[in-house]
Each structure stands twice: as C-alpha cells, then as structure tokens.
Amino acid sequence: DAMVIQNPRYQVTQFGKPVTLSCSQTLNHNVMYWYQQKSSQAPKLLFHYYDKDFNNEADTPDNFQSRRPNTSFCFLDIRSPGLGDAAMYLCATSSAHRGKLFFGSGTQLSVL
Amino acid sequence: GENVEQHPSTLSVQEGDSAVIKCTYSDSASNYFPWYKQELGKRPQLIIDIRSNVGEKKDQRIAVTLNKTAKHFSLHITETQPEDSAVYFCAAGENKLTFGGGTRVLVKP
C-alpha cells in the first residue's frame, strides 16, 4: 500500500545531542511537511518542501533543520535538542493540486 | 498568516445525541477545510473535508458546513457512538494547513 512511513516510532535522545528523524513516502507527492505536536495541542507546522523548494515557518527555531534529498525522503534534524523539544513529530505529504494531507504514524521524541 | 480558532475545547455528549464543533479562520484566501480525528498516540485521520466552492458536505453521520462570507465552518456528528470519542481538529488553508486548537469529544454510553 502507498503510504507515509516514519522511523523510528519512538526516539530517545540526550539534551544537546543531535538527532535525525526520517520520513519516506511511496505516494510520489511533491509536497512534504513536518509538524510538531505537543501533548493535547494542535499540530504546528515547522516547514515544508514543495519539490526541492524549502519553506520555513517564521516562528520555527533555527535549531530545527530539514533535508529532502529526493522525492521520496525527507529528514528532520534537531541540532541541539532541549527539553521543550520533546513532542510527537508528524510527517505528512500532499499532492500540490489537492491539498489533502497524508500523515505518517509519527515519531515520539523524548529528551533526557 | 492563517489563524484558526476552534470551539469548544472539550465536549461531552450522551450516546445518540449530536455533537457540533465550530471553527473560524482569518485568511480569505484559504479554500480547503478538512477535519481530522485523532485518537491517543495515533496519527490524525481525515474524516471529512470541504472546499470553498461547496457550502455543505455529508458522509453518513458526519457533515460539514462552510460559510465563506463569515469565515467559519462547522462539524456535525449525529447519533454519536462511544467510538466517536477522540480529539477533533479543524484546519484551513490549501497546500499549507493551519490547525485549530482541537476539541476533546467524550461520548458517554
């Protein structure tokens, strides 16, 4: 089945230790998004790629970076995780002309 | 940018009753309005969506209405069941969606 896959499902890192979360898709969608969701809150858009064009949200901290080496893969890099970065990170894709989001299962990040 | 307000934040209904959740948005350029259901620890699941050229859409027990002039849209769930208990999010935009704050719905048997 075509889908959005996130690995790992759970990630534990240490305060200040760089961590990378990964997302892959088989839908061949040209838009990929990273959302941060803290407990009981709405998903918050960090950035998205429209093909190779990177679009950062104005309030996304510099600590968060992203890479999209090809259509299928997208990575979220957190350079120096703080305790406040503990959250569920959701990857999503969409076809530019339709807008409907397809979410991955998310990666639950814990920072110790 | 877009700003989406969602009310109420919590909603408790008796099984079989109806539930209504309301959202307002700020950007008149937004033309896509989905609703997501999220169970604890799981991904948001799209349950229904509407585009700005449509005023109302229904899918079995779920319906969504949109008032573009007033910039608000609503989710209606009829004949609620315990499995409808979850957090519901509205969103607005097009290729970039902004989510409302969520409504925690509890359906009491």
Image: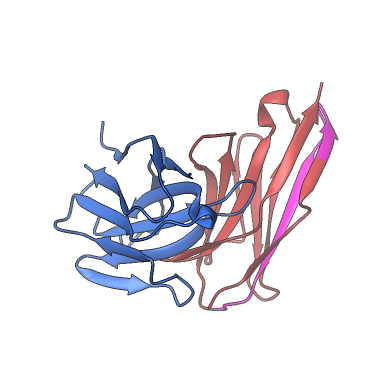
Chain colours: A blue, B red
Which region is colored magenta? Answer: B12-28
Rendered location of residue A97, percent (x, y): 32, 63
Q: Is residue A3 left or right of residue A86?
A: left
* A24 horizontally vs B68: left or right: left
| Vertical comparison of A24 with B90: above or below | above
Q: Is residue B21 magenta?
A: yes
Residue at 44%, 56% in the rendered image:
A35
Q: Name the residue rendered at 31%, 65% in the picture.
A: A65
The percent position of residue B99, horizontal first and vertical second, equals 57, 59
Is B77 or B97 nearer to us in this picture?
A: B97
Please state if A51 lies on the left or on the right of B26 as rendered.
left
The N terminus of chain A sits in image quarter? top left
Q: Is residue B40 left or right of residue A45?
A: right
Membership of B56 in magenta stretch: no
Taking the spot 64% from the left edge, 45% from the top edge, the residue there is B88
Residue most extreme to the top: B109
Residue lying furthest left: A70
Vertical position of residue B89 compared to residue B94: above or below: above
Q: How many marks?
A: 0
Evaluate whether residue A56 shows in this view.
yes
Residue in the image at 54% along x and 46% along y:
B48
Q: Position of residue A21 (x, y in %)?
A: 31, 48
> Which of the pair B1/A76 is nearer the observer?
A76
How far across and how far down the image is residue A41, in percent?
Answer: 62, 52
* Residue B15 found in image quarter: top right
Which of the two residues, B85 or B55, is positioned nearer the viewer here? B85
**Is residue B95 among the parts visible in the rendering?**
no
